[in-house]
Structure formats: structure tokens, C-alpha cells
Image (cartoon, rainbow, N blue to C red):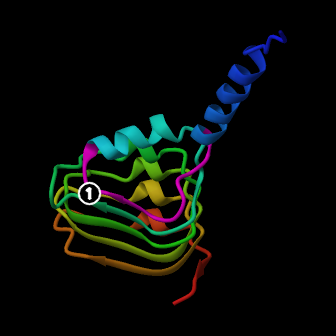
Amino acid sequence: MKQISLIPIILLSFFAFIGLKAQCPPGGLSFTSQSQIDDFLLNYPNCTIISGNVSIDGYEEVIDNIDGLVNITSIEGGLSIGWYTYLTNLDALANLTSIGGNLEIGWNLSLTDIDGLSNLSSVYSISIYNNSVLTNVNGLANLTSVEY
């Protein structure tokens, strides 16, 4: 009787699992809780480009940091940050260089600056509104392309 070695099967399964963890989730992302943002870096440690829209919405649950998004360099869709988040800054987005859609920052209760966006060079359009303690938008100084 012929024996089958399980080692190649185990190794193949391991590398397939690693490959899945390295990829970004398909399409857009909607973050409505702090744990979703925290888990993103754990689940997708090598994800740098999001293929759809990204929404960070603190309406249902307090969101006070976006450190789980630190590796993101490009968002092919839009980026919406708001609806009662308790973010004080966007420093975790320091690696972000392009947004293919609209950048919308609104209704953030504690956001004092957007300096974390200082590496952003291109975006389709920008909407910033109802951020009661936002004192400057100097983080957008390096934009070289705004389509609309």
C-alpha cells in the first residue's frame, strides 16, 4: 500500500494562508468600530492599496484612533472620515499618497489637525466641513493634483 506524505499538503496550506493574509480585502471598506480598525492591521498586515471606497464612521461606536490603517498608501475610491469620531489627528495616514475619489472629512468632534495627510499628492475632490476644533488644513499642502 502506498503512503502519502502530509508534509507537502501542510506546507501548501500554510503558504496559501500566508498569501491570503497578505492581500487586501476586495472592494471598499466600512469601519464602524474601533475593533474593526484595530483588527485590519492584524488581518491584512501587507495591505497597502484599497481598491474601493473607505469609510470611517464613528456614529455607532467611538473611534478614537486609526492606527490599524498605517500601511495604506493608496485608496482607489474615496475616503470618508467622520460622523462623530473622536480622532484628534490623522497621523496614521502618513503613508497615504493618493485617493482616487472624494476626500470627505466631516463631523469630527475632536479633530484638531490633518497633518497626517502631508504625503497626499493627489485626490479627486475634497470636502471638509463641521469639524468644530479643526484649526488648520496644512496637511494638504503637498497636493499636486485635485481633479474637481
Residue denoted by label 1? 112
Amino acid type, label 1: Thr
- In this picture, residue 143 sits left or right of residue 79: right
| Circle 1: element type | loop
Residues in magenta, as a range:
22-34
Name the residue furthest front: 1
Instruction: Give neighbour class at mark 1: few <14, some 14-19, many 20+ (Cα, 10 Å).
Output: some
- In this picture, residue 82 sits left or right of residue 3: left
Q: How many labels does the image show?
A: 1
Residue 73 is situated, as x and y percent measured from the top left of the image, at 59, 55
Give the answer, above or below, for where 106 lies relative to 20. Answer: below
| Residue 142 on the magenta span | no
Give the answer, above or below, for where 103 lies relative to 97. Answer: below
The secondary structure that most of the magenta stretch takes on is loop
- In this picture, residue 1 sits left or right of residue 70: right
- In this picture, residue 145 sits left or right of residue 79: right
